[in-house]
């Protein structure tokens, strides 16, 4: 059996070589003036633009939450350089981030401002959940990627019927509570951002062990060492898309979808029927209320829920 297998491979190699020679022969004989598939020195304009990848200049100055980024430090510059290039040339992902940012960032900005959290933290939602209610391999959920225990700690209801981690605005409120607590601990917004990835205790341990007090001086695991630079790169690109060759037609961005709220003080046995009573379908109800996990909603005595109903 082994001999037959080897013989089969040898045949495939021989036929592959014969096929390649045949294709090259056809290419060179078809047109005497075209002896190679690609000219030796083609004019730049002869190739589609996506072949013309260019290195990107690093901004001379950059800030996170009004704290300066020490770009003159070589490894800091290189780490920023990497994330700028990754997100600039990861076209489909970054295009959709820009389009979704138009819908979500103004709503998130308002909540951050209300809680006196620096505006730059809105970009955490871009790199955490990409403005989607995804579930990570570690069971972190939503725009802010809360795990179950952390979500409950910062005030989110998480049951079989209701999971407020899926509510972009309520989870932003919970994130603000975390960010305030972290700032009380570190007194530095850049470290606060890093702690959102590493955890407060993990980051504090690294600071104590290495006897430094700046994110940019810490030796951290790869994910956390990249984390703030990913935020900075997305911030830079979303705020200056043309600078990074993103041409997003204003007609193509996603806009805020107007809703009205219905206060619910009694249980709803069937949310499909409830949807129809509000002149919408169940799909639209779930689109605007992804925190509803079942087709029913049990309301305990004294509790109130607000259900968003799209204004069509």
Image (cartoon, grey):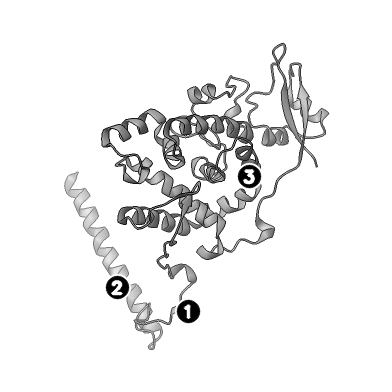
Looking at the rendered image, the disc whose residue lies closer to the viewer, 1 or 3, is 3
Is residue 47 shown above or below 178? below
- Among all residues in the image, which is located at the extreme top? 301
Q: Quadrant of residue 209?
A: top left
Q: Is residue 249 left or right of residue 4?
A: right
- Considering depth in this image, is 251 or 125 the residue closer to the camera? 125
Q: Is residue 45 left or right of residue 18?
A: right
List x then y, in percent, for residue 162: 62, 23
N-term-proximal mark, 1 vs 2: 2
CB contact under 8 Å: marks 2 and 3? no
Q: Residue at x 55, y 29 (%)?
A: 177
Is residue 158 shown above or below 243? above
CB contact under 8 Å: marks 1 and 3? no
Crowding near pointer 1: few (<14 within 10 Å), some, many (20+)?
A: few
Crowding near pointer 3: few (<14 within 10 Å), some, many (20+)?
A: some
Crowding near pointer 2: few (<14 within 10 Å), some, many (20+)?
A: few
N-term-proximal mark, 2 vs 3: 2
User: What secondary structure is marked by label 1?
Assistant: helix
What distance separates the C-alpha of mark 1 from that of mark 3?
Answer: 38 Å
Which disc, if any, is residue 45?
A: 1
Q: Quadrant of residue 299?
A: top right
Q: Quadrant of residue 20?
A: bottom left
List x then y, in percent, for residue 275: 77, 29
What distance separates the C-alpha of mark 1 from that of mark 2?
Answer: 30 Å
Which disc, if any, is residue 37?
A: none
What distance separates the C-alpha of mark 2 from that of mark 3?
Answer: 56 Å
List x then y, in percent, for residue 252: 66, 57
Is residue 67 shown above or below 285? below
User: What secondary structure is marked by label 2?
Assistant: helix
User: What secondary structure is marked by label 3?
Assistant: helix
Residue to which mark 3 is pinned: 104
Residue to which mark 2 is pinned: 21
């Amino acid at each position: 059996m082994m001999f037959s297998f080897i013989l089969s491979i040898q045949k495939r190699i021989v036929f592959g070589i014969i096929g390649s020679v045949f294709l090259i022969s056809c290419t060179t004989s078809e047109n005497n003036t075209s002896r190679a598939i690609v000219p030796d020195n083609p004019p730049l304009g002869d190739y589609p633009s996506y072949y013309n990848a260019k290195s990107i200049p690093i901004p001379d100055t950059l800030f996170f939450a009004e704290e300066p980024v020490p770009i003159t430090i070589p490894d800091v510059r290189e780490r920023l350089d990497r994330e700028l290039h990754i997100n600039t040339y990861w076209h489909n992902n970054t295009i959709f981030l820009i389009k979704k940012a138009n819908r979500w960032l103004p709503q998130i900005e308002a909540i951050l401002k209300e809680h006196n959290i620096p505006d730059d933290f809105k970009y955490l939602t871009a790199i955490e959940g990409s403005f989607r209610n995804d579930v990570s391999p570690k069971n972190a959920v939503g725009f802010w990627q809360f795990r179950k225990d952390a979500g409950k700690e910062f005030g989110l209801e998480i049951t079989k019927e209701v999971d407020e981690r899926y509510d972009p605005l309520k989870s932003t409120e919970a994130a603000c509570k975390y960010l305030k607590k972290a700032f009380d601990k570190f007194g530095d917004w850049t470290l606060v951002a890093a702690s959102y990835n590493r955890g407060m205790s993990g980051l504090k341990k690294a600071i104590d062990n290495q006897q430094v007090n700046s994110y940019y001086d810490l030796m951290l695991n790869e994910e956390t060492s990249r984390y703030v630079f990913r935020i900075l790169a997305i911030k830079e690109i979303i705020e200056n898309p043309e600078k990074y060759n993103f041409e997003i037609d204003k007609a193509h961005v996603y806009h805020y979808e107007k809703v009205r709220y219905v206060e619910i003080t009694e249980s709803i046995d069937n949310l499909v029927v409830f949807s129809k009573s509000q002149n919408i379908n169940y799909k639209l109800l779930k689109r605007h209320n992804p925190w509803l996990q079942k087709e029913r909603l049990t309301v305990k005595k004294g509790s109130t829920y607000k259900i968003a109903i799209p204004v069509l």
